[in-house]
Each structure stands twice: as C-alpha cells, then as structure tokens.
Image (cartoon, coloured by chain):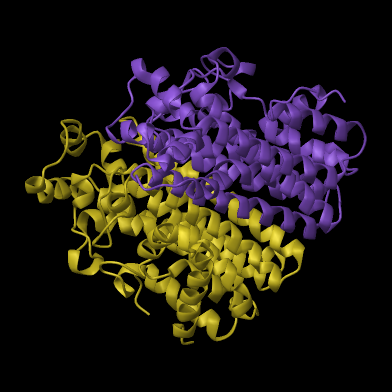
Chain colours: A yellow, B purple
C-alpha cells in the first residue's frame, strides 16, 4: 500500500487543526505552532516535520480493521498534536536548545511563551479528537477521547518519573519499564487502539492492537537506547554514546549500574567526558549490558509481533502495518 | 439556598478526580497536585484551596435550569482543574514564588516538575469532563467537551497576549478586552454555559447564561484592576497599588497611557517604586483613569445583569446565583 496519500492527508489535517489559531491578533501565537510543526521559519520542510509515524500507525490500524481512513483523520491529527505538545514541554524541562537541528520553540520565543504554546498544542489535540463527531457516533467519540486522555495521563506520569530519576542513584532495571511505558509506549499503544476502535473492531481485537503498540513502543525505545550508546551516527542521526555524556539513565546504563562493577564505579565518579566515551561503552559491553539490552529488545519485539498476529490486520494496510513495524524494529524484510 | 453542601461535594469530586494519580510509584506526583489544590502540605486548608467560585457557578446555573446538581459534578471539577492547571503554569511564566501565601508548586519541586504537574492537572480536567458519560447521553458529553476545549484555547490565546503585552509600549484600551476575555471571562462564561447545557436549557437560554458569565468575568476583572491600584489591602488581601509596582498593564494604566499626560511620561521613565505609588495612583486618578475604569466596570456589570435576567434562573438556585453575582460585582444586596 502506498502510504504517501495518507501522509499527505495527515499533514493537511494537521494544518486544518492548527489553523484554528490563525487570526490577526494571535498571529505570532499561530506562527509558534507552525514553526514547531516544521511548516514555517528557518529549516522548515520534511526534515523538520518528523516522520508522522504515530498518525500513520493509527490510520493503518484503522484501515486494516476495515475503516475508511479519511474518517479517522481527526484522531490521527490528535495523537500527533499530543506528541508535539509533549516535545515542546520536554524541550523546556530538559533545557534543550535544538530539536531536529532547529532552535527549539522556547529558545526562540522565551520560556513563558514556550510553556503556553505547548498548552495550545495540547488543547488543539483535545479539539481534534472531538472532530470525530463528524463521522462517528457520539459514544465512539467519548470512548476515543477517554483513550486519548488516559494516554496523556500516562505520558505525564512517565515524564514525572523521568525527571525524578535524574537525581536518583539507586535506580534498577525495574524502574526503567514504568518510565518508558509512559514516555514512549503509551502513545504508540494509543494510536493502535484508536485505529482499531475507529475500524469498529471487537474488544478483543482492540486489545490486541493496543498491546501490539505497547510492546512496539518498548522494543523501539530499548533499541534507541542501545543505539544511543553503541549505534552509528550515520544511521541514527545522533552521535553514538551521546547518551553516556548526557548521563541518560537508559536501559544499558541501568543494567551496568546493577552489576556494581567497573562501569558503576566510573559512573559514580561524575559526568562522562566525550574523550572517554568509547572506553566507557566498551566497559559497559564487557559487563554484558549490550547483551542484556539486546535480549530485552528481542523479547519486546516478539511480544509485539505475537500481538500483531493476534490482531490479524487485513489487506494492503495490514501488510503496510507489518512493514512499518519491521522498519521500526530494525528488522530486515 | 445553602451552598455549603454543593461546595463540600465539589471538594469530594475534585479529590476523586485527582485521586486517579494516587499510586505508589507516582506518589510524589500526586502530592504535587494535592499540595497545589490546598489539601496537603504547609498551609493546607480553606485559605489555600481558593473559593471554588467557578464550579459553584456551574452547579448553580445547572440547578437554576432544572438539573440535579450531583450529575453535573464532573463538569464542575473539570472547570476548577482547568483553572488550577492555568495557575500552575502562570506561576512559572510570571516567575511567581508565592500563591495564596504558600510557596508555588514549581518553586517547591522545580520548574520541570512544575510544567509537568500543570500538564497533569490539565489532563485530569479532560478526563473529568468525559465522566459526564455516567449521567448524560454521549452527544451532551461531546458538546460539553467541545465547550471546555474551546474555552481552553481562549485561555492560551489570552495568555499569549498577556505575555506579549509585557514588552509592548504601544498598547491601547482596545488591546485590553481580547486579553481579559481569554484570561478571565472565557472560563466563567464556560461555567455558565456548561451549567445551562447540563440543565438541558434551550440554545437561546444557554447563550444568555454564556453571555452572563462573559460579562461577569469582564466586570470582575475591571474591578480587580481598580482595586489593584486604589483598593484597600484589608478587603482584597493584596496590597493596593502593587499592580503599579509590578508594571501590570491593567485597564486604568491603559487609560492613563492613552492620555499621554503626566502619568504616561512617568510610566515611560521605568519601574514605579513603592515609595511613589500613592503619588502615581493620584496622578492616574486626576487624568480620569479611575472614572473611566469605573464607567467600564458599570457597563460590564449592566451587561452581565441584563443577560442574567434574560437567562431567567429559577428557584432557590437562581436566587443564590444572583446573590453570588452581586457579591462578585461588589454590589450591596
């Protein structure tokens, strides 16, 4: 299935949703949104918009359950707006100056406007989901809204854990899963569940789609963590081992800390410098953190694929969904 | 009508809604909410919770249209949670260290957790509104959600204007109304409209309630602006003229700037010191800003009361609503 018409329709729907703010008096407020979404300002273009993986997943899930994807577009826009609201706030919370090689919204317009613009994107996602009322019965709209809002609650829970972990040095691998469940898996799981709901799948199938998205998110995050320490820059676009310098408590690091060996001893001494990154990454691999992380990634991937089989996505959209999942999981076709 | 049972039920419903976050792993996240809501931590108690005017207005509007107020409680909680989410973010945006004589959430737990806790309160309000599904048909829930979300969009628009006004010195009285419409009137207007909707009033009556809330909000804000410059501390709890020292572009100040007289000249020289506040306030009054602001307050009050008569609230709740409106408008009974 050619996903280009879907991606193009997603972009149009996002522009329509964000367009609610296009009025003379709040023109600059609107510009903040269009800048962050990658449509306007320095560096605007496909590189700046991101891949729109989440709304695409939602539409493919919907179609693979038999839906007309056009009807599901407001929900697709809603999940992408949630993702972007959380990026805008995360950038402030993490003091990040750059995102996708562009100045972050809050660095460009200041912290107060940045917080408020994130709030604005969040409101737009709430409005988008109620637009489903144009094509679906009200009961379905309320159910979709509840799924979306519960997901957002998980996002804020995950973000709370992420921020509070920064100051803790007693973390174990068990602390990792609730954090990434909120930060990464919740929204992907929401996309798949919403797709199935809008495709009018039965409860059991909705649950299989939901679980597929959940484990896909976990598998993807673990792989991202592995690449953040041992991955190659050309492939991921981010410098390998930068996660070590940033002190990010990713899964390999938590495996390493648990060993209480050389890596743990070095980690406790203070921030890791760029010039020792290769050595520390090797240290971590020698203490089997690479192996353990890969095993975790494999396990999550298997769970994702088991649930995907259970969901049994139909037709060309089903094939496209399997293809997208394999791509995200870094598997050869 | 005794409003105490309503206020007590509002508090219980708020605790139930916020209770969604009460789980062992996110206990501290939950504590941030209960602290901000005034239930726990230093200075907890009635002084810290605020007056819950908005949810009370919503319930009184609902009952005065014939609703059972118990059914409308989730909507009452939703508007109060929106109000509190915006306070948490406003405090960060304004760099405020104190609210109701207590340390602000973000000063206590840090800026990153503060932004995220505000997001959490916002999500809780979204979830609360969908809880109306327990008592109302899905179409009404979707309509209520749309009203709430559109109000939140107005709030972020108003906040955008408020922040951007700080750096502008070309503002006129015309710039004032869109800003306070978003910041103050939108949420009060939402409370009254939601009340009428949940009381199953017809469209015209819903519109009259909405307009009543809108003008009530504007009248209240103008009065607050007047008190912020000439009011007495004992009555308002905030030191008179503190708005002048803070450089707040309130309505009297905009009237004064428009005159381009002595006040405008002094304002342009830089921040007003505490020791000259009385003199500058007199200057402003002499240039008829006091008079003009009072005329605006009277006009908004009249509009509010005209719409309230049009809404024609029934029974004891209607009387309590009129009483509450008069109290907010500083009018003798």
Q: Quadrant of residue A308?
A: bottom right
The quarter of the rendered structure image containing the C terminus of chain A is: bottom left
Q: Residue furthest left?
A: A275
Q: Residue B159 vs residue A135: left or right?
A: left
Q: Residue A194 vs residue B212: left or right?
A: left
Residue B307 percent across, percent down from the top left: 78, 46
Q: Residue at x 50, y 29 (%)?
A: B32
Q: Is residue A222 visible to the viewer in this orientation of the structure?
A: yes
Q: Which residue is drawn at 44% across and 78% down?
A: A323
Residue B106 percent across, percent down from the top left: 42, 30
Residue B216 percent across, percent down from the top left: 69, 39
Q: Is A319 located above or below residue A44 in the figure?
A: below
Q: Residue furthest right?
A: B315
Q: In which quarter of the image is residue A49?
A: bottom left
In depth, the one of A151 and A203 nearer the eye is A151
Q: Is A287 located above or below residue B87 in the figure?
A: below
* Label tally: 0
In depth, the one of A197 and B133 nearer the eye is B133
Q: Is residue B33 visible to the viewer in this orientation of the structure?
A: no
Q: Is A201 located above or below residue B312 in the figure?
A: below
Q: Residue A59 vs residue A260: left or right?
A: right
Residue B227 percent across, percent down from the top left: 55, 25
In depth, the one of A13 and A210 nearer the eye is A13
């Amino acid at each position: 299935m050619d996903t280009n018409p879907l991606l193009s329709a997603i972009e149009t729907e996002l522009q329509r949703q964000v367009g609610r703010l296009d009025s003379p008096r709040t023109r600059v407020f609107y510009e903040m949104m269009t800048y962050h979404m990658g449509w306007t300002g320095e560096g605007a273009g496909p590189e700046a918009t991101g891949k729109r993986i989440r709304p695409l997943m939602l539409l493919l899930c919907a179609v693979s359950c038999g839906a007309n994807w056009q009807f599901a577009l407001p929900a697709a826009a809603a999940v992408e707006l949630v993702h972007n609201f959380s990026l805008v706030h995360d950038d402030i919370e993490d003091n990040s100056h750059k995102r996708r090689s562009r100045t972050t919204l809050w660095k460009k317009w200041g912290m107060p406007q940045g917080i408020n613009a994130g709030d604005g994107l969040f409101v737009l996602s709430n409005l988008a989901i109620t637009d489903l009322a144009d094509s679906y019965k009200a009961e379905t709209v309320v159910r979709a809204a509840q799924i979306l809002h519960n997901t957002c609650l998980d996002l804020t829970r995950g973000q709370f854990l992420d921020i509070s972990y920064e100051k803790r040095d007693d973390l174990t691998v068990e602390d990792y899963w609730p954090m990434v469940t909120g930060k990464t898996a919740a929204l992907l799981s929401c996309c798949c569940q919403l797709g199935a709901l809008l495709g009018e799948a039965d409860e059991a199938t909705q649950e299989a789609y939901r679980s597929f998205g959940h484990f896909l998110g976990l598998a993807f995050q673990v792989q991202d963590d592995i690449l953040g320490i041992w991955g190659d820059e050309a492939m991921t676009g981010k410098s390998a081992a930068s996660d070590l310098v940033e002190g990010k408590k990713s899964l390999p690091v938590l495996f390493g800390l648990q060993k209480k060996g050389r890596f743990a001893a070095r980690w406790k001494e203070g921030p890791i410098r760029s010039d020792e990154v290769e050595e520390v990454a090797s240290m971590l691999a020698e203490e089997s953190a690479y192996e353990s992380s890969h095993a975790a990634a494999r396990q999550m991937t298997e769970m994702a694929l088991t649930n995907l089989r259970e969901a049994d996505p139909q037709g060309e959209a089903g094939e496209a969904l399997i293809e997208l999942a394999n791509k995200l999981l870094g598997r050869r076709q």
